[in-house]
Image: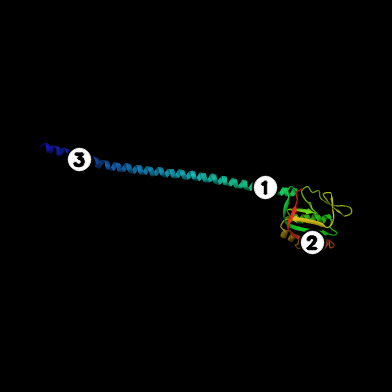
Amino acid sequence: MSRKLTIISISAILGVLLIIQAHSLPVSAEISTRDTALNMFREIQILKDTNRNLKSEIEKLTTSLEQLRNRSSALRALETEIAKNKLISGDTKIQGEGIRLTIGGDFDAVWMIDLVNELLLAGAETISINNIRLTNQTIGIDTLPNNQILLNGIILSQPYVFEAIGNSKILTEALEQPGGFTAKLNEFKEKVSLLIEKQKSIEMEKI
């Protein structure tokens, strides 16, 4: 009798445990599902925040890059302007290709000024006449009573030798084009001789 009671008690206890476990399983599964969903939501939020931060960082970097480009462009423009001013003022030595013009005969100051202007318009970087470099400090080209030409207080003697640094092809074509300087000189100054020579290298010392 005692053994039967023991078996019945154990069976009852096992039944109760099975019922409790049966009821607890759906709850555990539900908790696990909720935890998984919550973790996924958090990961999505983290990704969204990270993307926002990355977008903001990209925008900042893009702005910084644009500012650097603008500064670099401004710096290059400034450096170019400084170099140009140094050339104009004769403050720096210059060397490069160009042309040499040798002129003789009845050539006066007006034609000389016209030639200088033609060369500058054609892109000459700097010009010299009889080794006198023209700069923004040049006093001017004048004609004396005896038809001699005066440049920076120096009387020029013939032949007049012009040197211009720049693209030799462009400079030559500009002077020799129809209606250009050479054509006008041949028309109005028949007794003036003009020789144009392309030069691979011309040097002009700083003043």
Local secondary structure at mark 2: strand
N-terminal of the pair, mark 3 or mark 1, is 3
Amino acid identity at mark 3? Leu
Residues 70 and 161: in front is 161
Give coordinates of residue 145: x percent, y percent: 89, 53
Seen in the picture, residue 37 relative to 112 is either above or below; the reply is: above
Amino acid identity at mark 1? Glu
Label annotation for residue 79: 1
Q: Where's the N terminus, which quadrant? A: top left
Labels 3 & 1 near each other (Cβ < 8 A): no
Frontmost of labels 3 and 1 is: 1
N-terminal of the pair, mark 1 or mark 2, is 1
CA distance separating discs 1 and 2? 36 Å
State the residue at coordinates (45%, 44%). 48
Local secondary structure at mark 3: helix
Residues 27 and 68: in front is 68
State the residue at coordinates (17%, 38%). 10
State the residue at coordinates (36%, 44%). 37
Amino acid identity at mark 2? Leu
N-terminal of the pair, mark 3 or mark 2, is 3
Q: Residue pushed farthest left? A: 1
Q: Residue pushed farthest right? A: 146
Q: Which residue is mark 2?
A: 195
In the picture provided, is 74 more to the left or to the right than 57?
A: right
Seen in the picture, residue 12 relative to 191 is either above or below; the reply is: above
CA distance separating discs 3 and 1? 95 Å
Local secondary structure at mark 1: helix
